[in-house]
Image (tube, rainbow, N blue to C red):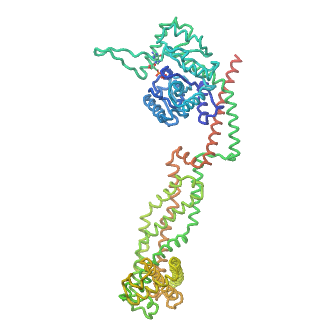
Amino acid sequence: MLTLTRQMIEIRNLLSTIDHSDSLRLPSIVVIGSQSSGKSSVLESIVGQEFLPKGSNMVTRRPIELTLINTPDAAGEAAEFPALKMHNLTDFEQVQKVLFDLNMAVPELECISNDPIQITIRSPKVPDLSLVDLPGYIQIEAADQPVELKQRIRQLCNKYLEAPNIILAISAADVDLANSAALRAAKMADPRGERTIGVVTKLDLVEPERARNILVNKKYPLKMGYVGVITKAPNPVKHSSGIFSRKQLTGYQAFVAQQNFEHTYLKEHKDEFFGTVNGTRNLKKKLMKVLEKSMAASLRPTHYAIQQELEETSYQFKVEFNDRPLTPQMYLANNIDILKLSTTKLSQNFSRRELRSLLKNEIDQKVLDLLAERYWNKPFSLKDSHINVEPDLRELSAISNIDDDVYWHKKLDLATNSLTKLGIGRLSTSLVTNAIITEIENLVDNIELRNHPLAKAAVRDAAKSVLSAKYFSTADQVENCIKPYKYEIEIEDREWQSSRENAVNLLKEEMRQCDEAFSLLKKQIGGRKLQQVIAYLEKLNKQKTIEIDFNSNDALGFSPNLIQRGQDAIFLKDRLSLLKMRYQFVKNSKKCKKKENKYQCPEIFLDAASTKLTSTAILFLNVELLSDFYYNFPRELDLKFFNNLSKEEIETFAKEDPKIKKHIELQERKDLLETALNKIEGVLAIQRNKINQLNKE
Ligand code: GDP
């Protein structure tokens, strides 16, 4: 059966993870002693291992909370740093190094940190104990540190020296007790000497008579008395190769040597030490007894304190979070479920029709560019109008029999060719890919995940990786599907009619944009000025002058910039008049009602072609890319969020949201308090049984 101390230490460690609230503290043994008093040696002889960092300059910068657990069946000793998730360390040089690093992580300027280092050592040789090694409380008197810093060290130490903790005050026998800084500090925290055990080290360095006088406890009485120890054996002097040298014993060897030396020394001076408590073994026994007793005394008050704290926490949990349970895992799972659900909805909203209009708009832009390039551009260019031998677009509508007109045939064939060879495969695949990613981002912005930047990025990555896995094959296959249109585009009457409507609308929109651009120019330059520069340029045009002579009288007052604007304005004016003409023609001419007249109606024909390309591409994208996405995206999410994240990462994720953090932490606190309460009630029940048993006997 576990000892009472062991169970109480467990509860103590549990409570220490909850918070540092004073009412929830179970006693621990706090070790203090000035430099060189032998403090480290005492702790190490209790543990039976050298593990404390050595060095003269404030090596202890953080309190070390040391939990010792007796493991009678274990083969050897092992240490762990629970906060660092380092377990089962059997190399104590490594333990020493970790402790050193943890201390040195506190900058020298700050000197100390309130954040304790927790270390647990399990060994068949240690008793169940809970000890604290405090940073240089004692040095502060001597060291020339700033007042404010001394204040901080004192505050930290005083907190540890409070009841119910037991103080282990270390003094060396070769220093007068009156000068013991440890005893002085203990006296301040425990004036009646009820919670202090005096440890006198280095018994071997003074006359046994003098040592005895200290240990019998007359001058500075403590209720728990003094224990005398020898915690370091003198190093054996070895004769080697003709000179004398000292061999430093380390590790277990040093421990054995110390035990032997102490044992022999005390045995040799048995009579002088009669009636005193001495030896590290007795010190251990005493510590166990004292700790157990004070743990037992703390049982009921701690039970009560936990109960109170639990009631308070439960109430808060009810008021603030309606008793709704929440763990990081639940929170994450919930969020991913919501995301998956909205992705299913996305598949309904993000219909084929929507995709088609998305792609159609994009291709329409290309069609407009093609039309501009091949049909609408620069009918009267300032520079080359006099050498322009190409037929004017104005002639196109007037032609009565176009069948023989090679020029206009070729023009449409070239435009169609440019359209079908645009690279629709990649264009449409990246368009849809980007659209899906944007949609997913919008989805995330509408759910709680928006408060988690890392998770947001992970969702985006998941979507991207599912989509990019399919990118190239999809683009290739779309390209294959539209391949027939590169040779021939068959259009039905019904399709022609609807494309005619589209073309009318497109032309109207293009006219509106042209008009808008012209108005903007007018606004920027001023109507009159623009009129003047246009008139000037048109005059030049009539004269077929190519170069503008800025020094001529006519051009006076027009800057090159203004001339450029004027040219832009003329371009827009001409474009507008052409578009108007085309608009009237496409909308009203009987010719445009028949698909056979396609060479005269490139706007309609190219729209029909782009509609076909769009539908075919979308049909394929829907099957190949989207269905695949809807199937694989939820799986990718599971993989990213559940398979790849550790418990800690999930916790970090959930706590990114301050509200969720508070909820989870309150829940954790409640759970921990409940566990602690159950445990302490278990201990109390055992105590009651023991008392009943004793009463019966
Ligand atoms: P700390 O600075 O208080 O942690 O003291 P240490 O444990 O480092 O000990 C200071 C010095 O005293 C070291 O050189 C130890 O070897 C020596 N020392 C510690 N305990 C004893 C002891 O019982 N007898 C003798 N002779 N030397 C000791």
Identified at 63% across, 23% down, the residue is: 294
Judge whether 465 appears above or below 490 on screen. above
Camera-side residue: 465 or 580? 580
Camera-side residue: 66 or 388? 388
Q: Position of residue 670 (x, y in %)?
A: 65, 39
Which quarter of the image is occupied by the N terminus? top right
Q: Position of residue 491 (x, y in %)?
A: 47, 82
In which quarter of the view is residue 25 placed?
top right
Would residue 214 be seen by someone viewing this image from the given angle?
yes
Judge whether 539 appears above or below 516 on screen. below
Camera-side residue: 628 or 155? 155
In which quarter of the view is residue 150 placed?
top right
**Outermost residue, bottom direction?**
400
Total labels: the figure holds 0
Identified at 55% across, 7% down, the residue is: 274
Judge whether 522 appears above or below 320 on screen. below
Q: Does residue 296 appear left or right of residue 635 in this picture?
A: right
Judge whether 646 appears above or below 218 on screen. below
Q: Does residue 476 appear left or right of residue 510 in this picture?
A: left
Camera-side residue: 393 or 95? 393
Which quarter of the image is occupied by the C terminus? top right
Q: Does residue 195 appear left or right of residue 126 in this picture?
A: right
Q: Position of residue 673 (x, y in %)?
A: 65, 36
Q: Position of residue 469 (x, y in %)?
A: 44, 60
Would residue 604 be seen by someone viewing this image from the given angle?
no
**Outermost residue, top direction?**
271
